[in-house]
Each structure stands twice: as structure tokens, then as C-alpha cells.
Amino acid sequence: MSAAIRTELLKIRTTRLVLLLFGVAAGMTTLGAVLTAARAGGGGSDVPSLSTAIGLRSVTSFTGFGLQLALILGITVASGEFRHRTATDSYLDEPNRTRVLIAKALAAATAGALLGLAIAAIATGVGLAFAAGKGYEVALGAGTMARSAAGATLGAALLAAIGVGLGSLLRSQIAAIITGFLWVGAVEQIAGGISDSLAAYLPMTAASTMAGATRYGAMPPIPSGLDPLPFGAVAVLLAAMAALMATVAARTTVRQDVT
């Protein structure tokens, strides 16, 4: 298993699309955090001043774009084998397809964790820089910021693992990526608008709240009446979703002919 994981990590490090996703995640996080910080406390803005804990938190937890791309990263790791027709070689090297799927999920989770940590560091750095530039004292405790960073790291890791399950189920990279974006941009927003209690259990919204996001400046938007699940409960929920997706994929599409 360790050899299979190392192989998958090597594929990730040498895949240009994965590297592009890291770059886009960093760029979008920087841009979003800067724009949120720049308008915080301004007239007509719903983001409180950076002199307040909630205002500063709205910037330091601006990791939603990166979390979405962690899901896409996992999809890419799984579906890329079918797009480039390298799945056959992978299964010849390791005939146990379930083992290959597990290795992909663990490798994607590792890459997702690195992505989550990077975007958390960027958002936190932007928030603290703007607060210092305006002469404000840091209104947010170090423990709170560390918890949000840990949430972004773990959330991105588990979303990447979920993405592997989705990519393995659909096989088509384009279809899987479109499905991922539609889920985040449409399904979760519609379902969250219908029921705040349901929104807390939706994977992207749950991951965002674990990463400290609030309704101020979050992307995707967090319902104003949402009562977020505890940190541990979100971790268990996302892990269960990843396991379920992998199990379904292992029992269905992963067993099918790949030639």
C-alpha cells in the first residue's frame, strides 16, 4: 500500500493541472481576502470592521474558493487516469483496484491538506496585514485562527478524498468537474436557502464552517441563520461521505473494463 501511495503522490506532483489548481487556489484566496479586507467596515459593506473579531475572522477564514478547488483536485486525481488512458497501466501495476482507489484517496487527501494549509496561511496573512495597516489591535485570538487553519487543512483533505470518489464514479473528467461545481454553486445554495438545518450537513458548507467561515464575505455564501455543526462532527461527516463515495465506486465503476 505504501508503494501505491508513493506512486499516486508522484503522479500528483507531476500533473500540470494539479499544479494549476494550487496556483488558482492561492490567487483566488489572495484576491478574495484582499477585497473583503478592503471593504470591511466601509459604507454599504456588510463586512464588519477589521477592528472587530467577526470582521477580522471574515478575512482570515476566506478559504471557500480553495476548498472548492480541493474537491476538484480529488476529481482530477481519479478521473485523469481515464481521460489520459493510463488506468490500464495503473491496474496492471496493482491488480487490486480497491487498493488503487484507496491509495488515490489518501494521496489526494495529502495534497488537499497542503492546499488547505496554504490558503489558510494566505487568508490569515492578508487579514493580519490589513489590520496592522489600519492600526488595529488583533481582535481575534491566536487559538481561533489556528482552529480555522486546522479546519481548512482537514476540510480540504477530506473534500479531496470525496472528489476521488466522485471522479471514480463518473470517470469522465469533464462531467465530474462540472458536477462538482454544480453541486457547490447550485445544489448546496438552493438546498441551503430552503433549510438552514439541512445546510449544516452539506459537504462544502460544512467544510467552510469548520474552516471558520461566517456569513460575512464567505464564498460560497453561508446562510445567515445557519447553526454550524461542531468541528469534530463535520470531520466525521466528511470522512463518512468520502468512505461512502469510495465504497460505491469500488463496487461499481472501478470494477468495470477500463480498456
Image (spheres, grey):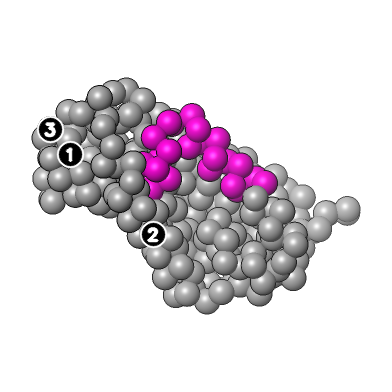
The percent coordinates of residue 145 (x first, y second) are 52, 67
Q: Which residue is mark 1?
A: 7
Q: Are marks 2 and 1 in contact (CB under 8 Å)?
A: no
The percent coordinates of residue 168 (x first, y second) are 36, 41
Indicate whether 165 appears above or below 84. below
**Mark 1 crowdedness (10 Å alpha carbons): few <14, some 14-19, many ≥20:** some
In the image, 259: left or right of 113?
Answer: left
Q: Quadrant of the C terminus?
A: top left
Report how far apart the C-alphas of labels 2 and 3 lie in the structure. 26 Å
Q: Which residue is mark 3?
A: 92
Indicate whether 254 appears above or below 67. above
- First along the sequence among labels 2 and 1: 1
Residue 213 in view (yes/no): yes
Q: Are marks 3 and 1 in contact (CB under 8 Å)?
A: no
Q: Choose top left, top right, bottom left or bottom right for residue 171.
A: top left
The percent coordinates of residue 194 (x first, y second) are 75, 62
In the image, 116: left or right of 123?
Answer: left
In the image, 96: left or right of 134?
Answer: left
Indicate yes or no whether the magenta region holds residue 179. Answer: yes
Q: Which mark is residue 244?
A: 2
Q: Which numbered disc, 2 or 1, marks the residue closer to the eye?
A: 2
Amino acid marked by disc 3: Leu
Q: Residue at x 88, y 54 (%)?
A: 43
Q: Are marks 2 and 3 in contact (CB under 8 Å)?
A: no
Callout 3: SS: helix
Q: Which numbered disc, 3 or 1, marks the residue closer to the eye?
A: 3
Amino acid marked by disc 2: Leu
Report how far apart the C-alphas of labels 3 and 1 lie in the structure. 13 Å
Callout 2: SS: helix
Q: Which residues are magenta?
A: 164-186
Residue pushed farthest right? 44
